[in-house]
């Protein structure tokens, strides 16, 4: 009998090992080498690039009036010049500078790229407002007072962020209309002031769920938005005694042609949540994969589109600026990611002045990062249950009294055999234990409402093993029936 | 609380350890800023923020436009871009412009730019201009003043009467604007010939040596009319007569009986014009043969190589006939003796 049991255990262990090995091999086979052709990417015309400059009335009557067409062409040149400089500083190559720089500015741009390569300095222009000062009658020479929001940072080793600034600055931009179009001839900065960093206090107690529809998670959510389904699903969430829902605003859906529809759908979702008595934690920049400096101005445009909507809605409790950005440190460099996050925080303060901000860190260890700039500290806890309480206590002790929420906990019910690696019973038990350990938090969100029949491999990776695990984190099965954890959660949430 | 303070001090210590300089094009450690970069004008922040001012003038560039100005109408815009030796925009100073059409004038520099609006003398041509600041002088820039075409009234010289199958030249008087500037070569004009019979002839007439000229081969034209010359929306007109052709001499007429067919053969020609050539192939001709007994038979056709030949049926054998032929050259009646057919023995 003992031998039989031993044999069975060994067999299961071997079977699991073989399955895991096969999954790993498949994942490797599915790997694609990703080449970040960021120079080409920066030069690819973005649909809104010619509208990224806001034009103001001229300082004085111009000899030649600035037509709408002129404004578009010159605006595009201004935007692309600074994007090309940022890309060149990042790549260390100066070849593409000639596309938008000439004369004095060309030499200075080249020098700045050389210095950036040596010392790690970077400069990213995020937004521009231009006031025409001078326009030659024959349309060959143009000058404007330009107000820009500019992020600068320096990291010698790519890991430590040695310094970071984000400021509103004014200067004089002089452009020449040459055979290949408008190019920046000279730029001289005249004044600068740092962007405001006023924090917005938040208090409350949230118990909620992370949400994607079962059939249209991740990238499919906004393109296939269905308000009737949202209404039904939010009813289910309310039925679990939750008072909040964490949603995800994919970056690509809110940039370009799809942005207008996505904005309408976002307004619709917020109204539904409000009607259901649910607060919303919108999580921005979801599935953003490219953090090259040439994309940051587009990110600023994304914030300018999305945040006014969120700011106006009474349903929005606070705003999660990025989901698990610490997981991108290794690939993109910690210093650049921190600079990007600081940039996003500062830009968000411009457009969401009365909403509190957070970042959804993937672990408790990362939670203290940028805590001095955020209003709410949030992290995810999928680590061993045993340390849950201590991790929360440590974070709370480090962040000087700011509210702390755990915006993702979860447990997969994917089961190969005999409760390995999970089961519905274990899910209820583990989630219950973790909730017990997190009682002192200001809020907890469970991942997720639904199981997902189709898991997007570009989001979670191509490993079949991981995909199966990710497909089964729901409190509801694919057929809509509740797993035991749903009732457990209802009881906990009802108890407060 | 104390632990968090220590943590943030640790972060902050990295930031405070070294001073960094930011300028219009980025950021560098203060200790690493190059001598060249230190001269860039504008705001530089660092341990001590400062506005770097430009030094003395070192370069001046001139832009004059529009590149082509209409005499008496368009203003010109002379612009000087001034820089110091490091490429910084000058913030002050006065620039002296020297324009071939307007002489000298002064403008003040603001953010590197000094400019002057001027109206060139109403004299067409290519002119030069320059700018100077202190002892520095710009390269020469060219600009152009063109005649005021809107003020040109095209007039046509009186033309000879139109004569068929001759080349007729239609010419304008010398074209000049209100300031006496001649219209430049190559300017396209249109001449329109409105005939008295309602038809029109369109001619393209490029301007050469201030005149527009077009030549027309008079053919299939039966009347004179009015010639109009158009330059833009301005036009002038002149009437022209039509002078029909006439025969230079009487055409020979041969007639020979063809008894078997109760017909005669007739040959008329050559039909020559007073312009010295045969009446053109295909010109219509109508002949009438009178057998002397009051019987008239007609036949029509077209000339070929100046001749018309036909067999006219229903005409009896006679010794002489009256033959009438009518062409564009007029109508003629001749009494001719019957002969043998051309080529018969």
Image (cartoon, rainbow, N blue to C red):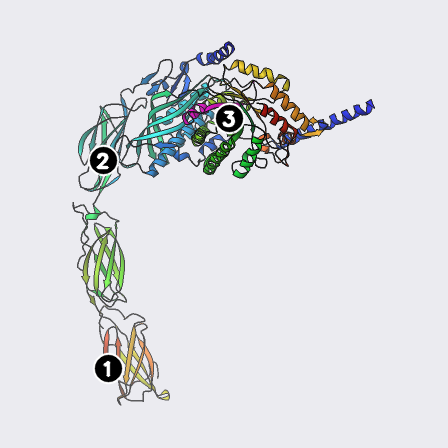
Q: Residues within 10 Å of mark 1 (few under 14, many from 20)?
A: some
Quarter that holds the C terminus of chain A: top right
Q: Toward the viewer: A374 or A149? A: A374
Q: Residues within 10 Å of mark 3 (few under 14, many from 20)?
A: many
Circle 2 SS class: strand
Q: Does label 3 lie on the same chain as label 1? A: no
Residue of label 3? A322
Q: Chain of mark 2?
A: B
Q: Chain of mark 3?
A: A
**Does A423 appear in magenta?**
no
Q: Which numbered disc covers residue B128?
A: 2
Q: Mark 1, mark 3: which one is toward the viewer?
A: 3
In the orientation shown, which residue stands out farthest toward the left?
B179
**Can residue A411 be seen by looking at this rendering?**
no
In the orientation shown, which residue stands out farthest toward the right?
A1
Q: Which numbered disc covers residue B334?
A: 1
In the orientation shown, which residue stands out farthest toward the front?
A495
Q: Toward the viewer: A167 or B312? A: A167
Above or below, comparing residue A455 to residue B206 in the picture: above
Q: Does label 2 lie on the same chain as label 1? A: yes
Q: CA distance from mark 1 to mark 3?
A: 113 Å
Give residue B63's quadrant in the image: top left
Circle 3 SS class: strand
Asked if disc 1 and disc 2 are in contact, CB closer than 8 Å, the reply is: no
Q: Which numbered disc covers residue B275?
A: none
| Mark toward the start of the polypeptide (1 vs 2) | 2
Q: CA distance from mark 1 to mark 2?
A: 78 Å
Residue range highlighted in magenta: A343-364
Above or below, comparing residue A79 to residue A361 in the picture: below
Q: Residue at x 18, y 35 (%)?
A: B102
**Does A361 appear in magenta?**
yes
Image location of residue A147, percent across then percent down: 35, 26
């Amino acid at each position: 009998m003992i031998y039989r049991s031993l044999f069975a255990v060994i067999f299961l262990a071997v079977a699991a090992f073989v399955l895991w090995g096969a999954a790993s091999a498949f994942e490797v086979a599915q790997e694609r080498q990703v080449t970040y052709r960021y120079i080409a990417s920066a030069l690819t015309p973005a649909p809104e690039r010619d509208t990224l400059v806001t034009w103001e009335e001229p300082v004085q009557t111009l000899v030649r009036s600035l037509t709408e067409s002129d404004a578009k062409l010159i605006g595009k040149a201004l935007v692309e010049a600074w994007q090309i400089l940022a890309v060149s500083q990042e790549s260390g190559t100066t070849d593409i500078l000639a596309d938008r720089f000439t004369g004095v500015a060309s030499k200075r741009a080249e020098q700045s790229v050389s210095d950036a390569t040596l010392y790690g300095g970077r400069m990213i222009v995020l937004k521009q407002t231009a006031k025409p000062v001078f326009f030659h009658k024959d349309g060959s020479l143009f000058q404007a007072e330009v107000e820009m929001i500019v992020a600068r940072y320096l990291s010698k080793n790519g890991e430590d962020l040695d310094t970071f600034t984000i400021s509103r600055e004014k200067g004089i931009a002089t452009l020449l209309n040459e055979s290949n179009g408008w190019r920046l001839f000279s730029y001289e900065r005249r004044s600068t002031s740092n962007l405001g960093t006023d924090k917005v206090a938040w208090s409350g107690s949230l118990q909620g769920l992370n949400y994607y529809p079962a059939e249209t998670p991740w990238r499919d959510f906004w393109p296939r938005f269905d308000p009737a389904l949202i209404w039904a699903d939010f009813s289910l969430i309310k039925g679990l005694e939750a008072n909040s829902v964490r949603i995800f605003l994919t970056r690509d859906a809110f940039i370009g042609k799809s942005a207008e529809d996505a904005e309408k759908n976002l307004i619709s979702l917020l109204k539904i949540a409000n009607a259901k008595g649910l607060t919303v934690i919108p999580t921005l920049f979801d599935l953003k994969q490219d953090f090259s400096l040439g994309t940051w101005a587009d990110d600023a445009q994304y914030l300018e589109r999305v945040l006014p909507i969120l700011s106006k809605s009474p349903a929005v409790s606070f705003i999660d600026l990025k989901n698990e950005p610490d997981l991108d440190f290794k690939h993109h460099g910690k210093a650049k990611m921190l600079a990007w996050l600081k940039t996003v925080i500062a830009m968000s303060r411009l457009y969401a002045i009365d909403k509190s901000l957070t970042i959804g860190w993937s672990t408790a260890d990362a939670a203290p990062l940028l805590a001095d700039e955020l209003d709410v500290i949030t992290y995810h806890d999928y680590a061993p249950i045993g340390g849950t309480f201590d991790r929360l206590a440590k974070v709370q002790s480090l962040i000087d009294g700011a509210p702390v929420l755990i915006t993702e906990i979860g447990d997969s019910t994917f089961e190969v055999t005999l409760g390995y690696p999970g089961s519905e019973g274990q899910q209820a038990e583990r989630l219950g234990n973790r909730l017990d350990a997190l009682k002192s938090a200001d809020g907890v969100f469970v991942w997720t409402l639904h199981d997902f029949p189709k898991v997007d491999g570009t989001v979670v990776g191509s490993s079949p093993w991981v995909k199966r695990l990710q497909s089964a984190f729901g409190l509801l099965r694919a057929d809509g029936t509740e797993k035991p954890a749903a009732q457990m959660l209802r009881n906990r949430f009802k108890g407060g | 609380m104390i632990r968090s303070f220590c943590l943030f001090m640790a972060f902050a210590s990295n930031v405070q350890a070294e001073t960094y300089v930011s300028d219009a094009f980025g950021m560098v450690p203060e200790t690493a800023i190059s001598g060249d970069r230190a001269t860039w004008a504008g705001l530089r922040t660092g341990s001590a923020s400062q506005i770097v001012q430009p030094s003395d003038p070192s370069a001046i560039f001139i832009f004059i436009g529009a590149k082509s100005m209409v005499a008496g109408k368009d203003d010109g815009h002379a612009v000087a871009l001034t820089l110091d030796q490091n490429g910084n925009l000058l913030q002050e100073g006065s620039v002296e412009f020297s324009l071939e059409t307007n002489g000298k004038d002064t403008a003040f520099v603001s953010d590197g730019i000094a400019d002057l609006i001027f109206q060139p003398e109403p004299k067409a041509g290519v002119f030069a201009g320059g700018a100077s600041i202190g002892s520095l002088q710009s390269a020469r820039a060219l600009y152009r003043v063109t005649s005021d075409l809107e003020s040109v009234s095209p007039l046509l010289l009186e033309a000879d009467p139109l004569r068929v199958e001759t080349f007729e030249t239609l010419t304008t008087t010398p074209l000049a604007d209100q300031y006496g500037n001649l219209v430049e070569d190559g300017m396209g004009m249109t001449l329109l010939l409105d005939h008295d019979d309602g038809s029109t002839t369109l001619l393209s007439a490029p301007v050469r040596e201030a005149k527009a000229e077009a030549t027309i081969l008079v053919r299939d034209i039966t009347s004179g009319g009015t010639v109009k010359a158009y330059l833009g929306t301005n036009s002038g007109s002149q009437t022209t007569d039509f002078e029909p052709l006439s025969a230079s001499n009487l055409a020979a007429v041969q007639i020979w009986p063809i008894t078997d067919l109760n017909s005669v053969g007739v040959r008329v020609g050559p039909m020559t014009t007073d312009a010295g050539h045969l009446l053109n192939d295909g010109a219509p001709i109508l002949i009438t043969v009178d057998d002397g007994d009051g019987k008239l038979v007609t036949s029509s056709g077209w000339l070929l190589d100046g001749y018309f030949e036909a067999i006219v049926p229903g005409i009896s054998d006679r010794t002489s006939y009256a033959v009438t032929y009518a062409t564009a050259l007029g109508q003629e009646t001749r009494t001719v003796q019957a002969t043998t057919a051309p080529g018969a023995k």
